[in-house]
């Protein structure tokens, strides 16, 4: 009997230790792109999916999208349902040679002014396009401002190109409103699974373990339609889907990789810093160009 119990507890413990963990982080909150589904419907559907799976996400808001009271009501629903609101700058400019460190800091500061009255606003910041600055000096200037102002970095660990799949979906629907959406769903799920595998394997090699992941997705039509399928896919394939707050407690998010070009997925940046994975790292980590031919071939 004892041996029986021992066997079963061992079985469950080993099941547990093998479940990779992933959380949902959603960027931009562009409530003014309304192909097929208006913003309030998209908001409702995305929030309903998170509720159904009993998970809390972090929404990184690009403040230029908040035009009026109606937009703020859509945002308030995220706070009301227990999700975290984070900062993603006002204008979503890439922090490169056209943007100074002072301009970047002012972008963050101004967006904070717009968001700070939100119930669940937290000082967590994600760089637009995951670009952390084109020089070491600029990168460090913003890092030090963030630290002084009690900000946490909202790093992505699993980066992907859902934004590009979404753009192709909208282009396709414009030409052919009756196009079979299932074909986009299949491509999207496969793409996300592939990228999740890549970054999770890289995490094992670079960090020596599977970190608690923050998956990057965007507030768009694609996720209004397929976020439920995406989360279900991770669950069906043995991953545990967790709250983003729990994920951000992983010690990996304290790291400040010293690699240049800076930014990308945090796992990518740590791999780059180690100098050991050059053959496995493409730059940028993710881009539309990597998906274009595959989507062309599928007629998407
Ligand atoms: Zn963004």
Image (tube, rainbow, N blue to C red):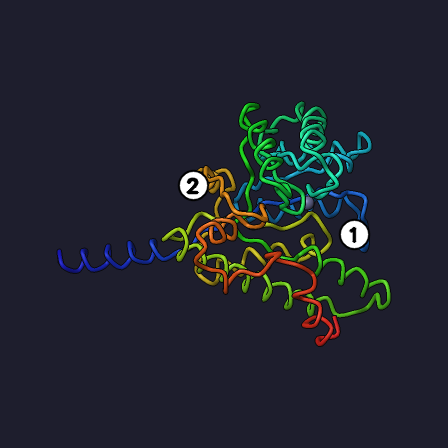
Distance between the Cα atoms at labels 2 and 1? 36 Å
Quadrant showing the C terminus: bottom right
Dots 2, 1 in contact, CB < 8 A: no
In front of the other: 12 or 287: 287
Q: Residues within 10 Å of mark 2 (few under 14, many from 20)?
A: few
- Estimate the x, y position of residue 287 in percent, counting from the top left: 66, 59
Horizontal and vertical percent position of residue 243: 50, 42
The secondary element bearing badge 1 is classed as: loop
Whichever of callouts 2 and 1 sits on the residue coming sooner in the sequence is 1
- The answer to whether any part of residue 83 appears in the image is no
Q: Is residue 154 above or below residue 189?
A: above
Q: Quadrant of residue 95?
A: top right
Secondary element at image label 2: loop
Q: Position of residue 273 (x, y in %)?
A: 47, 49
Residue 226 location, x and y as percent?
Answer: 65, 58
Disc 2 target residue: 250
Is residue 4 shown left or right of residue 193?
Answer: left
**Measured along the vertical axis of the image, is residue 211 above or below residue 183?**
above
Q: Which numbered disc, 2 or 1, marks the residue closer to the eye?
A: 2
Q: Nearer the viewer, residue 65 or 39?
A: 65
Q: Residue at image x 78%, y 52%?
A: 37
Occupied quadrant, residue 178 = bottom right
Q: Which mark is residue 37?
A: 1
Ligand 1 shown in quarter: top right
> Closer to the camera, 14 or 232?
14
Q: Describe residue 205's horizontal placement relative to residue 95 as left or right.
A: left
- Residue at 62% across, 34% down: 85
| Residue at the extreme bottom | 297
Q: Residue at x 63, y 41 (%)?
A: 133
Question: How many numbered discs sit on the rendered protein?
Answer: 2
Residue at image position (57%, 61%) is 282
């Amino acid at each position: 009997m004892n041996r029986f119990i021992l066997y079963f507890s061992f079985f469950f413990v080993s099941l547990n230790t093998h479940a990779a963990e992933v959380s949902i982080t959603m960027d931009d909150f562009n409530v003014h792109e309304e192909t097929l589904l208006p913003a309030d419907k998209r908001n409702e559907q995305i929030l309903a999916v998170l509720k159904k799976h009993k998970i809390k996400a972090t929404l990184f808001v690009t403040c230029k999208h908040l035009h009026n009271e109606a937009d703020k009501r859509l945002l308030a629903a995220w706070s009301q349902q227990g999700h975290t609101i984070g900062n993603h700058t006002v204008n979503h400019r890439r922090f490169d040679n056209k943007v100074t460190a002072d301009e970047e800091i002012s972008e963050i500061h101004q967006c904070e002014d717009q968001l700070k009255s939100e119930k669940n606003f937290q000082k967590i910041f994600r760089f637009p396009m995951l670009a952390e600055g084109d020089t070491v000096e600029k990168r460090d200037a913003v890092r030090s401002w963030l630290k002084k102002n009690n900000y946490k970095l909202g790093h992505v660990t699993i980066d992907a190109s859902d934004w590009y799949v979404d753009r192709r979906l909208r282009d396709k629907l414009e030409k052919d409103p009756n196009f079979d959406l299932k074909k986009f769903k299949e491509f999207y799920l496969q793409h996300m699974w592939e990228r999740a595998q890549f970054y999770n394997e890289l995490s094992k090699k670079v960090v020596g373990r599977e970190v608690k992941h923050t998956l990057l997705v965007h507030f768009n039509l694609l996720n209004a339609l397929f976020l439920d399928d995406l989360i279900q896919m991770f669950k069906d394939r043995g991953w545990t889907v967790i709250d983003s707050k729990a994920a951000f407690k992983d010690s990996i998010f304290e790291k400040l990789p010293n690699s240049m070009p800076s930014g990308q997925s945090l796992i990518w940046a740590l791999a780059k810093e180690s100098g050991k994975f050059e053959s496995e790292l493409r730059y940028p980590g993710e881009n539309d160009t990597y998906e274009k031919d595959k989507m062309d071939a599928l007629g998407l």
